[in-house]
Image (cartoon, grey):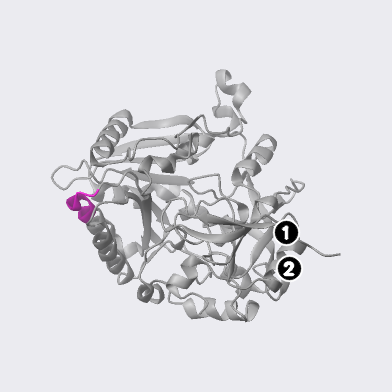
Amino acid sequence: MSVTVEVSPQPLSGWGRTASTTAMVSHPVDVASIELALRTQTGGIIARGLGRSYGDAAQCSGGLTIDASGLSNIGVLDEVSGTIEVGGGVSLHDLMRHIIPSGWFVAVTPGTRYVSVGGAIAADVHGKNHHRDGSFAKHVVEMTLVTPTGTVTVSPDRDPELFWATAGGMGLTGVVISATLRLIPIETSWIQVDSQRITRLEDLMTTMEETDNEYRYSVAWLDCVGHRDGNYRSVLTRGDHASSGAIPDRLRARSREIPGDPRIRVPRSAPRRLVNRMSVRALNEAWFRGSTTSVGSLHPLAGFFHPLDGVGDWNLLYGPAGFVQYQFAVPPERGDVVGEAVGAIASSGIPSFLAVLKRFGPGTPGPLSFSQEGWTLALDFPLGPSGLPALLDSLDEAVAYAGGRVYLAKDARLQPELLPVMYPRLRDMNAVCRRVDPEGVLASDLSRRLGISG
């Protein structure tokens, strides 16, 4: 029986809405269609989940992009082992809605739940609990992927080289069609949170080093615009899943409330750009003054992990030019790079709407996995300021030569000569790619730009 899948040309970009290119897009709903595409496609092919990578990782100019969202099966929850098998196109949003009422949660979630399981593996996403629980791939029991040389099931014990090259490999080893995930038990869908306002970056980092391990989740918001005399205001938020005994009677009916859909959406007819230095300064001021030092306050799960998911299409706030989300990680002994980066951003006059600082625990064996033990800082910059490219280039060099790296899932502009400095096991990645894809079928705009699997 022949297998056919309709394809059509479509312009694609990342969530940052930069570097748009056109590719043929297919929407397969079965494995046979994906296998056929990988056997017959020329001109490059890459999988795409929900389009939440910020840069050009999930697009393939002139080639084929496989929209994997049709791989949406959610299997039976095994409450004895705490595992579940799901399709690679299942969103964390849908998975959470399925498992929370039974008292389970994903072991790792990034800042949005609108990411597919396949995408979470390809980017080896991390969350507020990396210092305790590591990245997403550490909780993948096994996964099945379609490669140009066949469909295989791999795990940390079964072909570990391919497993770890896939975890963080940006889709360049194949299409993840299913994965078995290890979950964590929860009693409620609420987070018990301690918050602390801090006015000096040095004090913030010291506090995080001394106390983070007391909490499962920890994250700090930084104000890189409204600094005074070199001091940078921050709000440190730490917490854990609330027990059923911590839920007051008034919230008892909502003790395992599932995340909802966005309550508001940014219209595509929004003004040209709502994010600028004045608006960022005002928002930062309101955020800092609206935050309080508190202990044990209860926060809904969705609001704690995914505050921006409550606003649909929030990326449109940056206007048609789009924005860059820039994230780097440096070793624990190079916290000075964080301070230098924050100082350079503040003195540049270029606004960063979002600045988030976290601590990473040990990384994984993945040659392209981003997370490494130390510090990570994520920042949003609207495109437009003339000094932005030079600022980011200078940050790249400082990070690279401090033994750090930038997050490829958010990149659209890194210079290729810095990639092997940041990812010294690039040759290992390329060797695995050549083994499962000897003809170089799998490719993306990102891999071509940076020379991955070349």
Q: In the picture, residue 361 is in which quadrant?
A: bottom left
Number of dots carrying numbers: 2
437 relative position to 125: left or right: right
Spot occupied by residue 66 in the image (x, y as percentages of width and height)? 63, 60
Residue positioned 33% across, 40% down in the render: 273
Res. 5 mark? 1
Q: Nearer the viewer, residue 273 or 209?
A: 273
260 relative position to 385: left or right: right
Q: Is residue 47 above or below residue 82?
A: below
Residue reaching furthest to the top = 250
Chain part drawn in magenta: 343-350
Residue reaching furthest to the right = 1
Q: Residues within 10 Å of mark 2 (few under 14, many from 20)?
A: some
Which amino acid does the dot numbered 1 rest on?
Answer: Val
**Disc 2 or disc 1, which is closer to the eye?**
1
Q: Nearer the viewer, residue 419 or 318?
A: 318
Label 2–label 1 contact, CB within 8 A = yes
Residue identifier under label 2: 36
**Which type of secondary structure does the marked residue at label 2 adopt?**
helix
Spot occupied by residue 93 in the image (x, y as percentages of width and height)? 60, 42
Residue positioned 45% across, 63% down in the render: 408
